[in-house]
Amino acid sequence: MSGFEVLGVVLGTLPLVISALEHYQEGLHTIRRWRSFEAELQSLKRKLGNENAIFINTCQQLLSGVVGSVAHEKLVDEPFGELWSNPEMRDEIALRLDHVYEPFQATVVAMNVALGEIKAKLGLDEHGKVRWTEGTAIAREIKRATFTIKRSQFDDLLAGISKYNQDLKTMTNQSIQLEPERRGNAQ
């Protein structure tokens, strides 16, 4: 899978993880001992939501001017769609990013790995669904009761995602700013 395709995977995975966190909150309002659990979930959901918004903005900035508005909208709306595997589009993005294409790809892959670790810690399947919702009601409640979430479990991963996001944003901004000069030099 190319770095361009992984960009789409990350674009689709962040909302899945946020949705799964919302699912965890179902039924927790009435149990007092879960108050800190609920606060941790809210915090994690908010932080991932912020990172998702930044990532979407970076993707939109990277894609604008490279693909038409219809393809641009489709890429953002369908992060696991087939357009992400289009070699011509990947080549256009590579041209736009120029010499930072390789580090950009590596950063996107690292961000995807961190999201995979968050999904594993939350017990999510490959589609972002909570695994312990399956089975009998008693089994679900036992799994829910034994699951705990602590901020320290996610601090390093969130810091990594934030750093990767900032790096992607910086590389995109600088590449776009330098693009006219590079094109002028090429002529």
Image: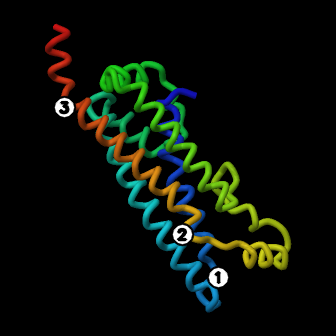
Q: Check disc 3 and report its element: helix, strand or loop.
A: helix
Give the CA distance from mark 3 to mark 1. Answer: 49 Å
**Callout 3, which amino acid?**
Gln
Q: Amino acid at mark 1?
A: Gly
76 relative to 174 in the view: left or right: right
Local crowd size for mark 1, using a 10 Å CA cut-off: few (<14), some (14–19), many (≥20) = few
Residue highlighted by disc 3: 177
Q: Which of the 4 image quarters holds residue 140?
A: bottom right
Mark found first going from the N terminus, 1 or 2? 1
Which of the two residues, 90 or 158, is positioned nearer the viewer here? 158
Q: Earlier in the sequence, mark 3 or mark 1?
A: 1
Closer to the observer: label 3 or label 1?
Answer: 3
State the SS at label 2: helix
Q: Which mark is residue 48?
A: none
Within 10 angstroms of label 2, few (less than 14), some, or many (20 or more) residues?
Answer: some
Callout 1: helix, strand or loop?
Answer: loop
The number of callouts visible is 3
CA distance for labels 1 and 2: 21 Å
Residue 83, relative to residue 50: is it above or below?
Answer: above
Tell me the tag on residue 27.
Answer: 1
Q: CA distance from mark 3 to mark 2?
A: 38 Å
Q: Which residue is mark 2?
A: 151
- Marks 1/2 in contact by CB < 8 Å: the verdict is no
Residue 99: x and y in percent read: 33, 21
Q: Earlier in the sequence, mark 3 or mark 2?
A: 2
User: How far across and down, in percent of the image, does residue 34 sit?
Assistant: 62, 84
Q: Residue at x 73, y 75 (%)?
A: 144
